[in-house]
Image (cartoon, rainbow, N blue to C red):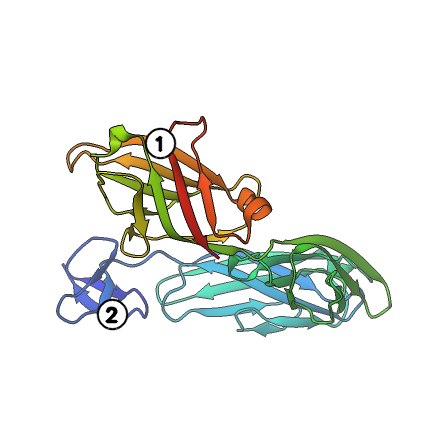
Amino acid sequence: MSRLRFTCTTLVMVLVVGLLVQCRKDPIKGWTYYHAPPPPLKIVRTTSLIKNCTAPYPVSFTQQTENLIGNVRYFWDFGDGNTSTDRNPNHIYATPGNYRVKLLVMNEISSDSTMFSLSELANSSIPVNAVFGFTHFNNNNFAPNKVLFSNTSTGANQFYWYFGDGGESNNDNPEHVFQNAGSYNVRLRGTCTNGTFNETVRQVFVNPAPRRVVIDSINLMLPRAFQSNRIYIEMYHNSILIGRTAILSRGSYPIKFRRPNDFLGGYIFDFVQFSGNEVFKFLVLRDNGADIPPDLVSEILLSSSFIQSRFYPRQYFQIEPIPFREDTFIDLYLDY
């Protein structure tokens, strides 16, 4: 018995035998397709923002629908005799009223609909409520930092932003770059055409620009008992493994690891904040061969805040394990 194939991106219909509900790739034609009809459309969220406190009322509508494949169509009925086929339309209600809005989303295999009420518009006026959210661009909150603001205010159609660093904007949904680290009180004022307004304040925190610390070389000192052992070092920034050294054995100490040939996987500590709880960790390990796990010889920690407050910008550090072990330490050479 034949079934319909639906491409995962464009719903091209061809014949296929099979019942697996998943995407597959045809090895000859190169198509990626569904063996069975994909999941139906599902409207998961609708929002409406009223952009004035008195009539006429401009309203912005947005929707979120899952399983969007094929030729997706939208149909909005605004409840006042007007309609739209836009994905996220704007509409002006000329007079107050208790309007019910209907949304229908369709493609070739399914449809979904929802209905909601705009009961606030039945009043001759509505309160102004200033509300906003924000995100750090690219999920990065290091200075200089671009912040994207999302304005979800209702009852207002004019907006004034004060970013707390001297910057201002009149855009509905502005972007702003904070050049320096700090805590900024961002204020939004939303104003209606009749002059009424409302303000809200949120705090935006920007971290100091991260630094990069590069390991140039390591001199490792160990007791004489380890002189004939195969030794290497794993390097961690807090709990994140940065890299490791090659396995070396010396008849005398110190064992010298030099960049780049003696470092495997990495030798750079990125995004160093020089905070109080930040550490560089060096695990000194003894290699026992491929089939036997290595032995931990020593764990040596270096605080990044210790570097900044006591040594920076010097490039040489001698660090010892805690508790102290006789004849065990690292001479560490760093670049910034």
Q: Count neighbours of disc 2 (C-alpha within 10 A) and say few if under 14, some if 14 to 19, many if 20 or more.
A: few
Alpha carbon of mark 1 to alpha carbon of mark 2: how far?
64 Å
Side of 41 where 158 appears, left or right: right
Query: Looking at the figure, which quarter contains the N terminus?
Result: bottom left
Residue highlighted by disc 2: 13
Label 1 sits on what residue type?
Ser
Label 2 sits on what residue type?
Met
Asked if residue 119 is positioned above or below residue 308 in the image, the reply reads below
Res 306 visible = yes
Residue 8 location (% of width, % of height): 30, 64
Res 240 visible = no
Residue 253 location (% of width, % of height): 29, 39
At 37% from the left and 65% from the top, the residue drawn is 69
Q: Count neighbours of disc 1 (C-alpha within 10 A) and say few if under 14, some if 14 to 19, many if 20 or more.
A: some
Residue 189 location (% of width, % of height): 78, 62
Residue highlighted by disc 1: 298
Residue 19 location (% of width, % of height): 19, 53
Q: Do tag 1 and tag 2 residues touch (Cβ < 8 Å)? A: no
Determine the secondary structure under disc 1.
strand
At 27% from the left and 65% from the top, the residue drawn is 6
